[in-house]
Amino acid sequence: MNNWLLFVVIGQFFYAAVVLTDRFIITKGVVPKPIVYTFYVGLLSIFAIGALPFGVTLPSGTTIGLSIIAAVSYVLSIYLLYESLKKSNPSEVVPVVGGIAAISAFISSALILNTGLPGHFLTGFAILVAGMLLISHFRFTTRAFLFLFGSGVFFGLSTVIIKAILENETFVNGFFWSRMANVLVAISFLLVPRIYTAIKEDIGRPNKSGKTTMVVGNKILAGMGFLCILIALKFGNASIVNALTATQYVFLLIFAVFFSKLLPEYFEETVHRHEFLHKSLATGLIVVGFVVLFL
């Protein structure tokens, strides 16, 4: 397949749309509490049961342990991301989280998979940090930055652990059991009285059908993005696929301009001319940082 690059771009377009919808769901009261939305998203991994006819077998103890660690890391990363999206604009939040996640993944790979850091790591690291600082306008509060930092660190760690699982399991087995671990972690939320109460109250709110449609529909969109990236990884160059993750940030910047004018009551982000140039430069630095890291 010669058009695998197109699948990368389409996949990142879907992911950018998912992030905007995530923020809408959280900020517009569709699911008002990030912890409750995190529960729903983790629980929706149950759809991985569709992989059962394709050769799922009982996992080893190592796979179970790694899957649980990956699931905890992933759930923590999306919870912290949703908390960040509740307070800040996606075109500022996601590039910072993505940059930190890339750095976290490289360091985690060196520590867990013994891959070693590439010679150009420090150059890519410096460019990413410069871009992240510039796009943040230096205006994130300490609390907001800690959320962003934690989300990126945990997301990078989860991807490396998933890679470790896949090195010891078939693709289908690794995918299935890592998703089932997400479900297990989500269900464990019900053991915390405060979270259980919040989930129970949200389920009892009116307009449940509209909420369900939006949440499930958004996760289907995320699944389509994931499928596009998997196709690209199968037929293309993994380094280029990873580097092109940065196109998501370009799409977010474009969406920020488009939706803030088309639907200002839903997408509050406004981009004035000077701010657009500022964000464009910062996004460009982050894109270059990704290219340097992964190529």
Image (spheres, grey):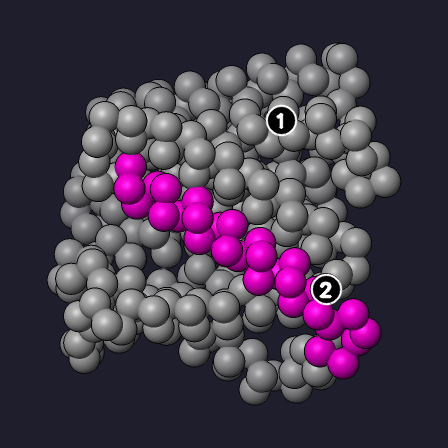
Bounds of the magenta segment: 203-232
The reply to whether residue 130 is visible in this rendering is no
Which quadrant is home to the N terminus? top left
Q: Is residue 50 left or right of residue 183?
A: left
Tag 2: amino acid: Gly
Residue for point 64% across, 43% down: 20
Give the percent coordinates (x, y) of residue 254.
Answer: 63, 24
| Nearer to the camera, 17 or 76 | 17
Mark 1 surroundings within 10 Å by alpha-carbon count, few (fewer than 14), some (14 through 19), many (20 or more): many
Residue 220 drawn above or below residue 148: below
Q: Is residue 212 left or right of residue 47?
A: right
Q: Is residue 236 left or right of residue 256?
A: left
Give the percent coordinates (x, y) of residue 192.
Answer: 60, 83
Which element type, helix, strand or loop, lies under badge 1? helix
| Nearer to the camera, 260 or 220 | 220
Which mark, by number, is residue 283?
none
Quadrant position of residue 258: top right
Residue for point 58% across, 84% down: 190
Instruction: Check contact, mark 2 vs mark 1: CB within 8 A.
Output: no
Secondary structure mostly seen in magenta is helix
Residue 209 is inside the magenta segment = yes
For the view shown, which residue lies furthest in the right direction?
265
Front tag of 2 and 1: 2
Q: Which residue is mark 1?
A: 253
The reply to whether residue 16 is visible in this rendering is yes
Mark 2 surroundings within 10 Å by alpha-carbon count, few (fewer than 14), some (14 through 19), many (20 or more): few
Residue for point 77% across, 39% down: 267
Q: Which residue is mark 2?
A: 210
| Nearer to the camera, 280 or 117 | 280
Which quadrant is home to the C terminus? top left
